[in-house]
């Protein structure tokens, strides 16, 4: 099996607002455009295909534990159909739908509709590697799972647990090779302030009341929320004293500073609810905090935990600017850049904000200057600088995408950033021309 990795390639035809796009999936991607133009359709499509790795991994775990593999690709295809409906909803209106994703080395998946029936089809290269893994499970990896521990001594039970763990880790490694990807997945949806508004009721929200990605987001929050019964510094101290892992203190300390600057408080999850402490004894409950704090808090917490644990992510952030002052929008991008650089993560951002785009440009421009031998450290912290070869930005409109990176400067084109203000300025200039005011 090959160990070469690819970021992937996506083709979309006739899907929602998208007529046709063909897109290489790059390390740091930004999508801008009007409402309902297809930014979320693109980011969700990439996330959908990348998330299938976890479904295949779960299938192989089931094979490990049962020793059986009835209709393997049929079972996986059935799960893909169900997941597609959970992700994107009904398909009756999508007659000419076509999705194609290349994981790498001709390992592809195509999704089409046949009489409103979702039809996933893997390439022969994907199938070949899939069945190689299945054969390895059958010929040895599943053996520990088929042993009956009732007749084993305590030392033999311990050895069996080690064998099982090793088998699971080996399957995980093989599946990562199959999909040419080893990153954890995180999707941070728009509309997340509702989650903090209903913070005390999250565990009672029924899965069918929210879409797939929002539900996954809620589950992620519920999983890590107990960690935040302590301050960020206490989390760092615990990590330092309770593990042998090497911490990237520079990145972590910068992240802490950014988070406290944005929130203007310290977030703590206590037995009687989530709170933002503005001092040692003064706090506001999270559901009574500002809309900006509510929108940002779980972007900040999730990125901090990922940095602390050195988790390499594929992360999608929808509208990170929501309800935030321009300075805080800039700091959100600084935080994302720290994660990107410290963990070699992959990032997709969808946005309407010129401040987000300008903040990204500043970090990219710093890299351009550094490569020319300039010392930028007095202006921008080097840990936040984004490699200009990594950044790719697109304007989404009329069912298509347009590359908006300037090939000479390596920056997002100024006209793309200023498109909204240009309309306003043109209107103002026309009004000004009507004015007979004399200086």
Image (cartoon, rainbow, N blue to C red):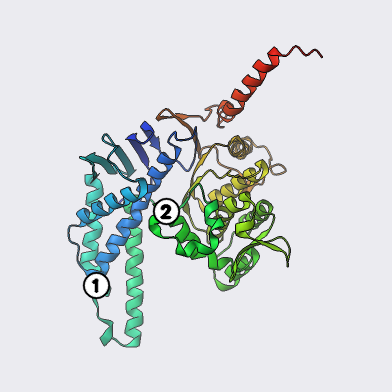
The residue shown at (58%, 30%) is 417
Q: CA distance from mark 2 to mark 1?
A: 40 Å
Of labels 2 and 1, earlier in sequence is: 1
Residue 210 got which mark? 2
- Nearest the eye: 239 or 245: 239
Residue 85 spot, x, y in % from top left: 31, 48
Name the image quarter holding the C terminus. Answer: top right
Q: Nearer the viewer, mark 2 or mark 1?
A: 2
- Nearest the eye: 419 or 191: 191
Residue 320 spot, x, y in % from top left: 56, 45
Please determine whether, in this image, residue 333 is positioned above or below residue 148: above
Regarding residue 122, the answer to whether it shows in the image is no
Q: Quadrant of residue 75?
A: bottom left
Residue furthest out toward the left: 70
Label 1: which residue? 143
Residue 31 spot, x, y in % from top left: 49, 37
Give the structural element (helix, strand or loop) at label 1: helix
Residue furthest out toward the right: 439
Regarding residue 262, the answer to whether it shows in the image is yes
Tag count in the figure? 2
Residue 415 got which mark? none
**326 relative position to 65: left or right:** right
């Amino acid at each position: 099996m090959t160990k070469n990795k690819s970021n992937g390639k996506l083709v979309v035809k006739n899907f929602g607002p998208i007529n046709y796009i063909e897109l290489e999936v790059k390390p740091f991607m930004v999508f801008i455009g009007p409402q309902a133009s297809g930014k979320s359709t693109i980011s969700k499509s990439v996330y959908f295909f990348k998330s299938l790795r976890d479904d295949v991994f779960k299938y192989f775990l089931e094979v490990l534990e049962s020793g059986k593999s009835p209709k393997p690709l049929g079972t996986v295809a059935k799960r893909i159909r169900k997941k597609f409906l959970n992700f994107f909803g009904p398909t009756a209106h999508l007659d000419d739908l076509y999705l194609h994703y290349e994981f790498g080395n001709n390992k592809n998946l195509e999704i089409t509709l046949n009489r409103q029936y979702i039809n996933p089809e893997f390439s022969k290269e994907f199938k070949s590697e899939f069945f190689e893994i299945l054969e390895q499970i059958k010929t040895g990896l599943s053996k520990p799972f088929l042993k009956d521990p009732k007749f084993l001594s305590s030392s033999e039970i311990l050895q069996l647990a080690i064998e099982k763990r090793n088998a699971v880790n080996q399957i995980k490694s093989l599946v990562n090779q199959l999909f040419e990807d080893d990153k954890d997945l995180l999707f941070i949806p728009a509309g997340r302030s509702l989650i903090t508004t209903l913070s005390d009721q999250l565990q009672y929200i029924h899965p069918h009341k929210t879409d797939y990605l929002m539900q996954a987001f809620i589950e992620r929050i519920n999983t890590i929320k107990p960690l935040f019964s302590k301050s960020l510094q206490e989390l760092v101290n615990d990590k330092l004293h309770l593990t042998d892992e090497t911490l990237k203190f520079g990145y972590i300390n910068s992240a802490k500073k950014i988070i406290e600057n944005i929130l203007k408080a310290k977030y703590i999850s206590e037995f009687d609810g989530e709170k933002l402490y503005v001092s040692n004894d003064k706090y506001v409950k999270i559901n009574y905090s500002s809309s900006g704090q509510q929108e940002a808090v779980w972007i900040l917490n999730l990125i901090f935990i990922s940095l602390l644990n050195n988790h390499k992510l594929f992360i999608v952030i929808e509208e990170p600017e929501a309800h935030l002052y321009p300075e805080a929008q800039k700091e959100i991008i600084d935080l994302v850049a720290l994660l990107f650089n410290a963990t070699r993560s992959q990032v997709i951002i969808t946005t309407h904000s010129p401040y987000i785009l300008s903040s990204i440009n500043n970090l990219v421009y710093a890299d351009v200057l550094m490569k020319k031998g300039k010392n930028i450290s007095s202006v921008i912290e080097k840990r936040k600088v984004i490699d200009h070869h990594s950044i790719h930005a697109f304007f989404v409109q009329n069912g298509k995408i347009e590359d908006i990176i300037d090939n000479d400067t390596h920056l997002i084109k100024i006209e793309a950033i200023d498109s909204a203000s240009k309309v306003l300025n043109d209107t103002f200039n026309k009004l000004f021309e009507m004015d007979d005011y004399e200086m």
